[in-house]
Amino acid sequence: MKRYLLAVQFDESHPETEEELRAQLARTHKVNLEMEAAGSWVFAGGLMPSYASTVVRPANGTTTMTDGPFAETKEQLAGFWVIQCEDADQALAWARKGALACGRPIEVRPFNELPAE
């Protein structure tokens, strides 16, 4: 089994209404249950908006911190799934279901499975 990150993107300039958010969460919950039943679900989580983030950046043996995201873009990371699948096709199938459930784009990225030393 390979692990994949399904990264949910969200355009923060177009927030949902409370009613839209509740409906989206209900649809997403059904996908979570389906993933769990299939043995693919590992972990999932929603994230606060990007204004709640802090970027910690290394420089010359020390760090600096700035509020908010570093990248200036409309789409931000809104949530994610960590899943395990037989192959990329299966991960993409879950991403399609997730995208339809939450109404947002999903980036599918395999984990870099480094061998144990």
Image (spheres, grey):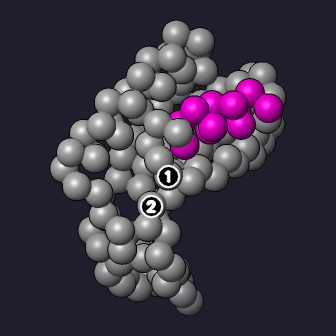
Identify the residue under disc 2.
10
Marks 2 and 1 close (CB-CB < 8 Å): yes
Q: Is residue 46 left or right of residue 59?
A: left
The residue at the point 28 percent across, 47 percent down is: 20
Q: Give the x, y percent position of residue 99.
A: 54, 43
Q: Main secondary structure of the magenta part?
A: helix
Identify the residue under disc 1.
104
Q: Give the x, y percent position of residue 46.
A: 36, 46
- Kindly give the residue lying farthest to the left in the view shown: 18
Q: Is residue 67 left or right of residue 35?
A: left
Q: Is residue 111 among the parts visible in the rendering? A: no
**Towards the viewer: 26 or 72:** 26
Identify the secondary structure beneath mark 1: loop
Q: Quadrant of residue 94?
A: top right
The residue at the point 52 percent across, 26 percent down is: 42
Q: Give the x, y percent position of residue 79.
A: 43, 49
Residue 78 falls within the magenta-colored stretch: no
Identity, as a three-letter code, of the amino acid under mark 2: Phe
Q: Give the x, y percent position of residue 49.
A: 31, 64
